[in-house]
Image (spheres, grey):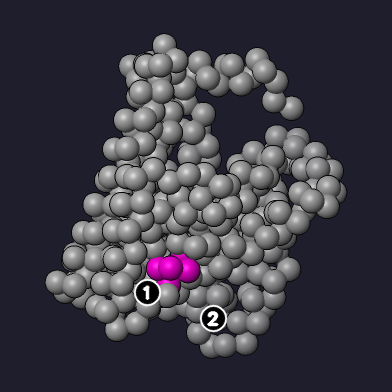
């Protein structure tokens, strides 16, 4: 249980200057988490010979094995199952797990089909989707700056739709599932480790079924993977858990005004990988569309940072 003393302690950690050792470790953890999330595209590219759904099945199964082991080592497994007896909590966790599964699957499909730039677009749009949910669900008011950003993002989607000759469905699916997932996470009173463990546990049966179903095919992981590919598949749980734990460490030591802008490194890395490494098409229309999204994000970021500084000044 979190006490007032714990909260006060956390506040002290967040308000220490960056020169402090704990904050330096927070910055390092945050940068490491986002770099891992960005470059994970290369990991999935190395496994592109296998069906995306089979890979997601393995990712969930391996994550459950690792996360349950970590919880057992921390003697928190029994406590987690006791808390999940709460029907309302179980319902939120189940919905969150479904959104997470769709997000993961969409991402792997996009990488598998050579559309990494579209994945980048999804992660660029996600923060703006979160802002929209704040207005529609939490009844927050949009400031003029936020309205301008949302308008630019809408125009960007229209431009990119014309460029692709279709709606950027994958990008919108990734942005929507991640935004709603983030909203639900606000309502789940579990630590990052417990939350992800519970979400993957909910998915263990369908994930295991996916792995078993694909065994019948000649190109399945068990029947065609090399030793290196088997190792990569076995480590999918590790690549899922490590960035999350690094992010949790960073979030306890850094203010959101420092941590928030770091998230844009993920879509920037994906954009550059898709363009420079995987040589995906980047015509003028797409450059214009992405530029509009970037401008919208820069406006929102600067506005948030300035308001946070003003708030800190008033508090001081």
**Few, some or many residues within 10 Å of mark 1 (<14, 14–19, 20+):** some
* Residue located at (24% from left, 59% from top): 292
Q: Nearer the viewer, residue 263 or 235?
A: 263
Q: Nearer the viewer, residue 293 or 80?
A: 293
* Residue located at (53% from left, 40% from top): 245
Can you tell which mark lies on residue 168?
Answer: 1
Q: Which image quarter: residue 158? A: bottom left
Where's residue 254, x and y in %?
43, 28
Residue that protrudes farthest toward the top in the picture: 316
Q: Is residue 40 left or right of residue 252?
A: left
Where's residue 204, x and y in %?
70, 64
Does 172 lie within the magenta span? yes
Can you tell which mark lies on residue 107?
Answer: none
Confirm whether residue 257 shows in the render.
Answer: yes
Which region of the structure is painted magenta? 170-174
| Residue for badge 2 | 220
Depicted 96 relative to depicted 251: above or below = below
Q: Nearer the viewer, residue 178 or 106?
A: 178
């Amino acid at each position: 249980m979190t006490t007032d003393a714990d909260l006060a302690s956390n506040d002290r950690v967040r308000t220490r200057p960056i020169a402090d050792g704990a904050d330096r470790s927070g910055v390092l953890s945050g940068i490491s988490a986002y770099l891992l999330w960005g470059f994970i595209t290369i990991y999935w590219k190395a496994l592109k010979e296998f069906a995306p759904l089979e890979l997601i099945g393995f990712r969930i199964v391996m994550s459950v094995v690792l996360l349950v082991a970590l919880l057992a080592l921390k003697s928190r497994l029994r406590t987690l199952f006791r808390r999940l007896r709460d029907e309302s909590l179980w319902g939120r966790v189940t919905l969150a797990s479904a959104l997470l599964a769709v997000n993961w699957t969409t991402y792997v499909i996009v990488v598998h089909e050579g559309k990494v730039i579209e994945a980048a677009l999804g992660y660029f749009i996600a923060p703006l989707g979160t802002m929209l949910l704040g207005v529609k669900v939490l009844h927050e008011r949009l400031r003029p700056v936020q309205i301008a950003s949302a308008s630019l993002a809408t125009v960007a989607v229209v431009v990119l739709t014309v460029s692709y000759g279709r709606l950027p469905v994958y990008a919108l699916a990734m942005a929507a599932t991640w935004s709603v997932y983030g909203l639900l996470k606000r309502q789940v009173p579990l630590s990052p480790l417990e939350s992800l463990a519970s979400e993957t546990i909910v998915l263990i049966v369908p994930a295991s079924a996916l792995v078993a179903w694909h065994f019948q095919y000649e190109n399945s992981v068990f029947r065609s993977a090399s030793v290196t590919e088997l190792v990569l598949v076995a480590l999918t749980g590790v690549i899922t858990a490590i960035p999350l734990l690094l992010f949790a460490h960073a979030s306890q030591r850094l203010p959101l005004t420092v941590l928030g802008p770091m998230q844009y490194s993920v879509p920037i890395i994906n954009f550059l990988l898709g363009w420079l490494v995987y040589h995906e098409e980047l015509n003028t229309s797409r450059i214009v569309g992405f530029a509009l999204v970037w401008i919208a994000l820069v406006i929102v970021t600067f506005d948030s940072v300035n308001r946070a500084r003003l708030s800190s000044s008033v508090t001081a």
